[in-house]
Image (tube, helix red, strand yellow):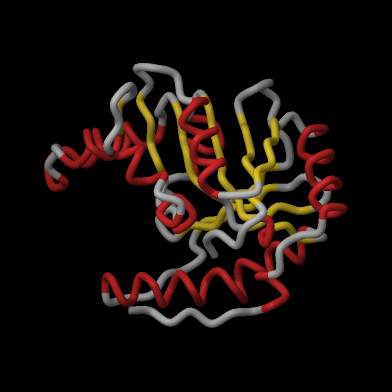
Amino acid sequence: MATFLSNSEFTQLASEQQIERTVQALQAHGMQVAVFATGAEASAYVLAQIPAGAEVYNSPSHTLETIGLAEQIEHPTRFHSVRARSAKLDYATQRNEMRKLAAAPDVLVGSVHAITESGEVLIASASGSQLSAAACGASKVIWVVGTQKLVRTLDDGLRRIREHCLPLESERVRQEYGQGSAINKLLTINAEHEPGRVTIVLVKQQLGF
């Protein structure tokens, strides 16, 4: 069982004023925002946003696992799970098909590592498996984000990723796979030009890294 160290600077939930500033900035940058008190409320909201029959990819996310949303997406009843479909493919011979499924789903559900008060969204990745869908490939993107991930500036967001997220993720994957993680690829979203494509679900709980 991994033991995760805590950095109070990056684990403290945002104030109502910081949430409001961030919401206004995100909306001004073309992203929809919903705010909930609990992960259970957020999960119900996210599931209601997924169209029937959609192909849904849930990117790797400790947040989604914590609130049980990953399990619900991977075992759906009215839409289709990209992960479940990929699990039936052979990695050695069908890797390209697996990559295409993750790159352009109907709906991407995941989380991010930091959001600034000026409306910038940051996602770091070792493999980049979720980044193409987030940037452009997915028709609809839904991110569930605990408000401890709200930061003041872009520099604070980058520092949060380096000093807080990376050590925790490295410890987690080392326990599971025997090796640490790395910030090999970093996506910063300044705005979304397609109305309604991106929805950010802020939760007033400490969720994820």
Q: Is residue 205 left or right of residue 50?
A: right
Q: Between 107 and 204, which is closer to the camera in this rendering?
A: 204
Q: Residue at x 54, y 57 (%)?
A: 124
Q: Is residue 154 left or right of residue 42?
A: right
Q: In the rendered image, is residue 132 in sight?
A: no
Measured as percent of width and height from the top left, residue 161 is found at: 61, 66
Q: Residue at x 78, y 41 (%)?
A: 23
Q: Between 92 and 201, which is closer to the camera in this rendering?
A: 201
Q: Residue at x 24, y 33 (%)?
A: 97
Q: Between 131 and 74, which is closer to the camera in this rendering?
A: 74
Q: In the rendered image, is residue 142 in sight?
A: yes
Q: Residue at x 32, y 32 (%)?
A: 101
Measured as percent of width and height from the top left, residue 33 is found at: 70, 35
* Up-down relation of residue 169 to residue 42 (above or below): below
Indicate the quadrant containing the N terminus: top left, top right, bottom left or bottom right. bottom left
Q: Between 25 and 148, which is closer to the camera in this rendering?
A: 148
* Up-down relation of residue 35 to residue 185 (above or below): above
Instruction: Give the quarter of the image for residue 192.
Output: top right
Indicate the quadrant containing the C terminus: top left, top right, bottom left or bottom right. bottom right
Q: Is residue 130 left or right of residue 37?
A: left
* Up-down relation of residue 32 to residue 118 (above or below): above
